[in-house]
Image (spheres, grey):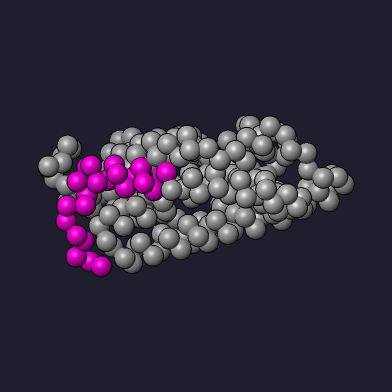
């Protein structure tokens, strides 16, 4: 029995539609990923947390994660593949842009990028970050199921900080620090997995998995 509304199918359908509405077109999606990644690199290099937060707000990578979890739960393979591709390509675009912008910064500054606190803090994979992402994923899924509080998804993006770790990976590759690149990428993966699992558990608790979607 669901702990929420008895009209599960209606709520689930409305949630799917909201996810489709906020999922922007491919070109716009990857453009914003590129912009947010570039902003993140500049913010990290400048050791400016305000710029880094701005990059998190611009990044649209959170939405495909919720779409992926919901599609997996209801076994909607078409949407599942689309959201998975968006996540993978978005990651690659972010990594490439971060790497390129880091090289540009090195050329402009004429010296190697200094590993400041903003950069190093994104290269410390810790299981606790996974639980933060897990809770954020649960909150985000709940927000999408409740249209009156969907604006809080922006707060989820800031809390989990998906883009900065992948930006640090790009910085690490640009300066030849493979350990930095690897550790920050692990943190990125922790965040992705945490959000997906948390949102899946919340969608499941709401009752969205009780009926298989016939339109597969």
Residue at the right extreme of this rendering: 110
Residue 101 on image: x %, y %: 72, 52
**In this rendering, does residue 37 appear at all?**
no
Considering only vertical position in the picture, is 92 above or below 52?
below
Residue 133 shown in magenta? no
Considering only vertical position in the picture, is 175 above or below 124?
below
Residue nearer the viewer, 139 or 168: 168
The residue at the point 15 percent across, 41 percent down is: 2
Residue nearer the viewer, 197 or 69: 197
Query: In the picture, which quadrant includes the C terminus?
Result: bottom left
The residue at the point 65 percent across, 58 percent down is: 96
The residue at the point 17 percent across, 52 percent down is: 210
Residue 4 on image: x %, y %: 18, 37
The residue at the point 35 percent across, 36 percent down is: 139
Residue nearer the viewer, 43 or 162: 162
Mainly helix, strand or loop, the magenta region?
helix
In which image quadrant can residue 49 be found?
top right
In which image quadrant can residue 41 be found?
top right
Considering only vertical position in the picture, is 59 above or below 80?
above
Query: Where does the magenta region start and end?
Result: 194-216
Q: How many marks?
A: 0
Q: Is residue 120 left or right of residue 207?
A: right
**In this rendering, does residue 41 appear at all?**
yes
Residue 215 shown in magenta? yes
Residue nearer the viewer, 142 or 146: 142
Residue 97 on image: x %, y %: 66, 55
Q: Is residue 107 left or right of residue 125?
A: right
Residue 1 on image: x %, y %: 12, 42
């Amino acid at each position: 029995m669901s702990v929420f509304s008895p009209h599960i199918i209606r709520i689930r359908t409305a949630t799917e539609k909201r996810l489709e509405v906020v999922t922007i077109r491919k070109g716009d999606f990857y453009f914003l990923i590129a912009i947010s990644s570039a902003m993140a690199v500049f913010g990290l290099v400048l050791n400016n947390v305000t710029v880094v937060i701005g990059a998190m707000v611009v990044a649209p990578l959170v939405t495909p994660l919720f779409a992926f979890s919901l599609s997996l739960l209801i076994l909607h393979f078409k949407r599942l593949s689309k959201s998975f591709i968006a996540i993978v390509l978005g990651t690659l675009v972010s990594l490439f842009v971060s790497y390129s912008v880091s090289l540009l910064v090195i050329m402009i500054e004429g010296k190697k990028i200094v590993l400041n606190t903003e950069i190093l803090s994104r290269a410390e994979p810790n299981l606790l970050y996974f639980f933060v992402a897990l809770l954020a994923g649960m909150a985000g899924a709940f927000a999408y199921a409740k249209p009156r509080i969907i604006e809080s998804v922006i707060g989820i993006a800031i809390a989990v900080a998906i883009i900065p770790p992948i930006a640090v990976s790009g910085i690490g590759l640009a300066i030849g620090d493979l350990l930095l690149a690897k550790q920050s990428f692990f943190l990125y993966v922790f965040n992705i997995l945490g959000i997906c699992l948390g949102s899946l558990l919340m969608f499941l608790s709401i009752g969205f998995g009780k009926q298989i979607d016939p339109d597969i």
